[in-house]
Structures are given as C-alpha cells and as structure tokens.
Image (cartoon, grey):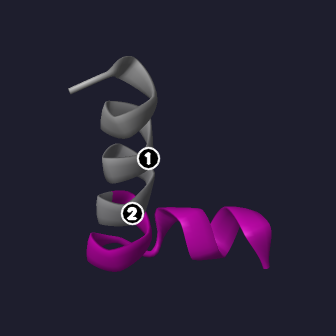
C-alpha cells in the first residue's frame, strides 16, 4: 500500500463518513 493509496482512502472515508469535507467545500 502506497502513500497515495492511503491518502485516497482517507479522503474517501472522510467524504463518506463525515460532513467536514462537504461543509468545507460547499
């Protein structure tokens, strides 16, 4: 598992699990 994969998974989980990303973007 590479750092890029970890980062992508982290972003996916954040988008899926919390509204932090949505609140920050929209």
Q: Quadrant of residue 25?
A: bottom right
Q: Residue furthest left?
A: 1
Number of numbered discs overlaid on the protein picture? 2
Residue at x-position 39% and y-position 63%:
12
Looking at the image, do the residues carrying marks 2 and 1 touch, with CB atoms under 8 Å apart? yes
Where does residue 18 sit, x and y in percent of width and height? 34, 71
Q: In this picture, is 18 found above or below 8?
A: below
Where does residue 16 sit, x and y in percent of width and height? 34, 77
Where does residue 10 sit, x and y in percent of width and height? 33, 46
Q: Residue furthest right?
A: 26
Q: Nearer the viewer, residue 2 or 20?
A: 2
Measure the C-alpha gap from mark 2 to mark 1.
Answer: 6 Å
- Residue 18's tag is none
Q: In this picture, is 6 found above or below 21?
A: above
Residue 21 relative to residue 4: left or right: right
- Residue 12's tag is 2
Where does residue 20 sit, x and y in percent of width and height? 49, 63
Which residue position is annotated with label 1?
8
- Judged from the image, the secondary structure of the residue bearing numbered disc 1 is helix
Q: Residue furthest top?
A: 3
Q: In this picture, is 24 found above or below 19?
A: above
**Magenta stretch in the rendered image:** 14-26
Q: Nearer the viewer, residue 25 or 3?
A: 3
Q: Quadrant of residue 21?
A: bottom right
Residue 16 on the magenta span: yes
Q: Main secondary structure of the magenta part?
A: helix
Quarter of the picture holding the N terminus: top left
- Dot 2 crowding, Cα within 10 Å, few <14, some 14–19, many 20+: few
């Amino acid at each position: 598992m590479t750092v890029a994969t970890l980062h992508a998974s982290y972003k996916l989980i954040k988008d899926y699990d919390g509204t932090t990303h949505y609140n920050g973007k929209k």
